[in-house]
Every structure is written in structure tokens, then in C-alpha cells.
Image (spheres, grey):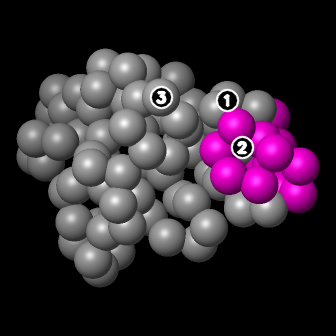
Amino acid sequence: MGALHGACGEEQPCAGEDDGCGAGVVHAIWIDEGNLNNSQEYQQVNHVVINSGGRAIGRDGKPIEGSIKENPASHIPLTDWLKWKECNKP
């Protein structure tokens, strides 16, 4: 696993044209491999961290409060995210 940057798995951040995730908005998507030895339960499974328009997105598709380090909702299980209809919201 590694980082995927851009809309819906594209190689580069999207902006301008309708990119399927919101025209004119830059998105960054990180897909991280889970680590069973991590003390944080939400990081023990493969997970996604999304930055949409400069805001970290939570499991409900809404911007989170605080930073991704402070808010476990910013780590979305990969199996859940793959079911989302858009790259930055369920």
C-alpha cells in the first residue's frame, strides 16, 4: 500500500474540470496498510485518509474536528471507503 494522490485514484490532485469528486476542488487520498502492532485500533486495518478542499474528511464524509492525529474518525477503513459513491463522501 502507499499513498494515492488525486481524485478517485488518479496520479495527481484534481482541480478545475469536473473530476467526479467536485469541480475545482483539490483532493488527496492516502491509502495506508494496517499494522496489527499499532496501539491505535483504527490503524490496525488498511485505511484511507482523505483531504478534500483542505479539510480532513471523516467516516461520515464530513470534515472532521481537529487534526487527523487527534481524531480517529479521519482513518476510514479501506473496506468501507471502497463502497463510497464518490472519493470524498459516501
Instruction: Please tell me whether residue 34 is drawn above or below residue 61 in the rendered image.
Output: above
Q: Residues within 10 Å of mark 1 (few under 14, many from 20)?
A: some
Task: Give the camera-side residue of 81 and 11.
Answer: 81
Q: Position of residue 89 (x, y in %)?
A: 43, 44
Magenta range: 11-23
Residue 10 shown left or right of residue 33 in the figure = right
Nearer the viewer's eye, disc 1 or disc 3? 3
* Residue 71 visible somewhere in the drawing: yes
Q: Amino acid at mark 3?
A: Lys
Q: Is residue 49 magenta?
A: no
The alpha-carbon separation of the residues under discs 3 and 2 comes to 16 Å
Q: Residues within 10 Å of mark 2 (few under 14, many from 20)?
A: many
Please give the name of the residue rendered at 24% of the width and 40% of the height, measured from the top-left corner: 43
Instruction: Please tell me whether residue 42 is drawn above or below residue 28 in the rendered image.
Output: above
Q: Amino acid at mark 1?
A: Gly
Quadrant position of the C terminus in the picture: top left
Task: Give the camera-side residue of 65 and 4.
Answer: 65
Q: Position of residue 83 (x, y in %)?
A: 38, 21
Nearer the viewer's eye, disc 3 or disc 2? 3
Task: Please tell me whether mark 3 sits on a helix, a strand or a loop.
Answer: loop
Q: Are marks 2 and 1 in contact (CB under 8 Å)?
A: yes
Residue 23 shown left or right of residue 84 in the figure = right
What residue would you read off at disc 3? 85
The kind of secondary structure the magenta stretch mainly shows is: loop
Q: Residue 21: which disc?
A: none
Please give the name of the residue rendered at 36% of the width and 51% of the height, measured from the top-left corner: 61
Please give the name of the residue rendered at 72% of the width and 43% of the height, measured from the top-left corner: 6
What residue would you read off at disc 1? 9
